[in-house]
């Protein structure tokens, strides 16, 4: 359905857990963030019901995220349940990839179409530092598993961090010359742990673009890539993969935003940067009908703001880490 700004809202991101097996320094403090008590986290059956209701009012695309979705027990059965909803024609997962190699096959068999893997460095030691302990070899094995299973397009998400991984932009973009991978450079958003210092580490997508063209040649615009939302995609000459840019801060794409989020705690959030959430847990737990739940989805869509103000003077996102909202 359309929101108040004539945008078709057909994409729901479902955060299945606020827990994560990594502690990326821009996302969480070293000790993590307080997690939601188990009883407060929606059961996967409740999330399935909410997706069924959202499908009734036009949601066609679902992304499973977190926290780290692969740490949630019962995820494969959940994917299977979502894949069985006739209206859902695109079902994807965003993961840090640590557990992907061991799970990819069963997830694909359950109906998962594709994966986005977050990867901010190609150097094992630096990857471990950014993630506070992550093992790059495991992530790479996960990416290879997704490619081997042809879960195309396999996308990599790289957050641009000035002074930290700007020396790897060329190597990351060059992956697209060797593999059918879609490497997306994402601007650091002032949310969660990095809110106080995000501006110091900020590197614009435009700067990354210049670095790539200077070192690897021209980037040619690609018209359509499955699931292409806010990213704009380009191809280096002869590359099987593409390079994407997500300019969340320098050039917001709110006029093209088609998403709604369901948090692990049962809040419907219409904008990543807007703290307001519509509680659906209470309705789910008192056994509301699908029609009633659909009306709540409609209400959340109707409240979607026209645009966010992130990046403007003095404006930051909320204190909540992306792990709580569902990045
Ligand atoms: N654990 C999964 C993963 O790592 O992909 C899913 C959740 S994670 C919060 C989703 C994405 O949000 C990751 O690609 C992460 O790098 C990104 N992210 C977290 N905090 C961010 C920030 N402040 N700005 C930009 N991206 C951020």
Image (cartoon, rainbow, N blue to C red):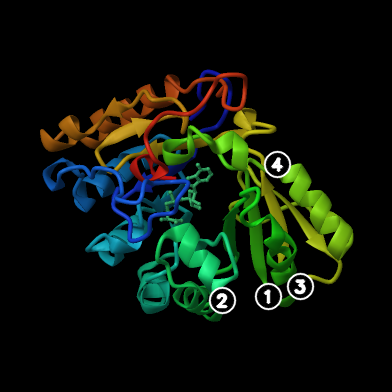
Callout in the foreground (1, 4): 4
Q: Residue 119: which quarter of the image? A: bottom right
Q: Whole-Å distance between the Cαs marked 2 and 3?
A: 15 Å
- Which residue corresponds to mark 1? 179
Q: Residues within 10 Å of mark 3 (few under 14, many from 20)?
A: some
User: Which mark, by number, is residue 177?
Assistant: 3
Marking on residue 204: 4
Q: Is mark 4 within 8 Å of ligand 1?
A: no
| Front of the two marks 2 and 3 | 3
Relative vertical location of residue 140 with respect to residue 325 in this rendering, above or below? below
| Whether label 3 touches label 4, CB < 8 Å | no
Element under disc 3? helix
Query: Closer to the N terminus: mark 1 or mark 4?
Result: 1
- The answer to whether mark 2 and mark 1 are in CB contact below 8 A is yes
Using the image as rendered, state which of residue 28 and residue 155 is in the foreground: 28
- Indicate which disc, 2 or 4, sits on the residue closer to the N terminus: 2
Q: CA distance from mark 3 to mark 4?
A: 23 Å
Q: Nearer the viewer, mark 3 or mark 4?
A: 4
Q: Mark 2: give few (<14), some (14-19) or many (20+) Cα within 10 Å.
A: some
Give the left or right position of residue 271, taking residue 69 as reference: right
The residue where tag 2 is placed is: 147
Nearer to us in this view, 55 or 157: 157
Q: Gap between marks 1 and 4, in whole Å?
A: 25 Å
Mark pair 2, 1: CA separation: 9 Å
Residue 174, given in percent of the width and then of the height, sits at 74, 69
């Amino acid at each position: 359905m359309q929101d108040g700004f004539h945008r078709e809202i057909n994409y729901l991101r479902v955060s299945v857990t606020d827990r994560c097996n990594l502690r990326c320094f821009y996302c969480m403090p070293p000790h993590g963030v307080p997690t939601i008590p188990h009883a407060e986290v929606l059961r996967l059956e409740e999330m399935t019901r909410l997706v069924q209701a959202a499908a009734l009012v036009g949601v066609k695309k679902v992304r499973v995220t977190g926290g780290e979705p692969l740490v949630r027990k019962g995820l494969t059965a959940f994917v299977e349940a979502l894949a069985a909803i006739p209206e859902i024609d695109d079902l994807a997962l965003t993961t840090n990839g640590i557990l992907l190699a061991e799970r990819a096959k069963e997830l694909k068999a359950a109906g998962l179409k594709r994966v986005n893997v977050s990867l901010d460095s190609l150097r094992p030691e630096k990857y471990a530092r950014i993630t506070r302990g992550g093992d790059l070899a495991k992530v790479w094995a996960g990416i290879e598993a997704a490619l081997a299973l042809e879960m195309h397009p396999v996308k990599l998400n790289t957050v641009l961090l000035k002074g930290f991984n700007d020396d790897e932009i060329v190597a990351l973009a060059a992956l697209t010359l060797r593999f059918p991978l879609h490497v997306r450079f994402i601007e650091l958003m002032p949310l969660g742990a990095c809110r106080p210092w995000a501006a110091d580490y900020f590197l614009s997508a435009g700067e990354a673009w210049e670095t790539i063209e200077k070192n690897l040649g021209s980037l040619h615009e690609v018209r359509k890539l499955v699931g292409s939302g806010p990213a704009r995609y380009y191809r280096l000459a002869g590359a099987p993969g593409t390079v994407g840019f997500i300019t969340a801060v320098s050039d917001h794409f709110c006029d093209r935003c088609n998403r709604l989020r369901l948090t692990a705690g049962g809040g419907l959030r219409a904008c990543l940067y807007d703290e307001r959430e519509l509680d659906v847990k209470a309705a789910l737990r008192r056994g509301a009908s699908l029609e009633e739940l659909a009306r709540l989805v409609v209400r959340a869509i109707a409240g979607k703001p026209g645009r966010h103000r992130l990046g403007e003077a003095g404006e930051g996102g909320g204190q909540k880490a992306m792990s709580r909202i569902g990045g």
